[in-house]
Image (cartoon, rainbow, N blue to C red):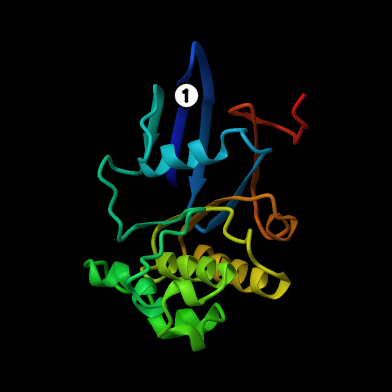
Amino acid sequence: MSTVRLSRVTKRYQRGREIVTAVDAVSLELGRESMTALVGPSGSGKTTLLNLIVGGETPDEGTVEGVSARPDWARLAIVPQTLGLLPELTMTENVGLPLRLGATAGGDVAEVMELLGLGSLGERPPEQTSLGEQQRAAVARALITAPALLIADEPTSHQDEANTGRVIDALAALAGAGSCVFLATHDRRVLDRCDPVVHILDGAITDEPRLRR
């Protein structure tokens, strides 16, 4: 049984006098116990598609099933490119924020931070850590509730080889425990661990990767 099903989902934007189709009649199923990668050049529609799945955007046509209009943040977790850490909280407090907001713990905050190489940074505010460390904290925050669905936008873009391995190992473990992980990426190290890999070009799903003309 799929976790999320998209049926001919389309999203358009007005850009001056031009209508731009950011996502074009996309049909897609995301199953449990899977780590699926979304691949495409910049501007191909990856982030818009992720936003449509999590409810940040409303499709102009088509349907998204499996995520309610008011998402259950105990079952859905997001790692955005902007990371979204709160500067007034410590790294530990940022990772544990979903639990303070009422979500059920799916793991121990200290253990998840240690797993992602953040064990010594718990009392620091985000501004006293590197961008890579902040990105791993955003991943840890998403993992802490063991969500049924985790959506991540370029979750290894600021990671070196060793820390990319930590991030992907953690996401793969979540998928192996029965969750659905869907991530947009350009990182070959990530693609090698994902199955299936979905290609998007000019807003449409393609059978094979192609370069933009």
Above or below 175: residue 106 = below
* Residue 82, visible in the rendered structure: yes
How many labels, in total? 1
Q: Which residue is mark 1?
A: 10
Above or below 24: residue 4 = below
Q: Amino acid at mark 1?
A: Thr
Q: Residue furthest bottom?
A: 120
Q: Residue at x 57, y 59 (%)?
A: 155
Q: Secondary structure at mark 1?
A: strand
* Residue 177, visible in the rendered structure: no
- Measured as percent of width and height from the top left, residue 59 is found at 39, 27
Badge 1 local density, few (<14 within 10 Å), some, or many (20+)?
many
Q: Residue at x 46, y 60 (%)?
A: 179
Q: Is residue 49 left or right of residue 70?
A: right
Quarter the C terminus occupies: top right
- Measured as percent of width and height from the top left, residue 64 is found at 39, 34
Q: Residue furthest left?
A: 102
Above or below 93: residue 131 = above
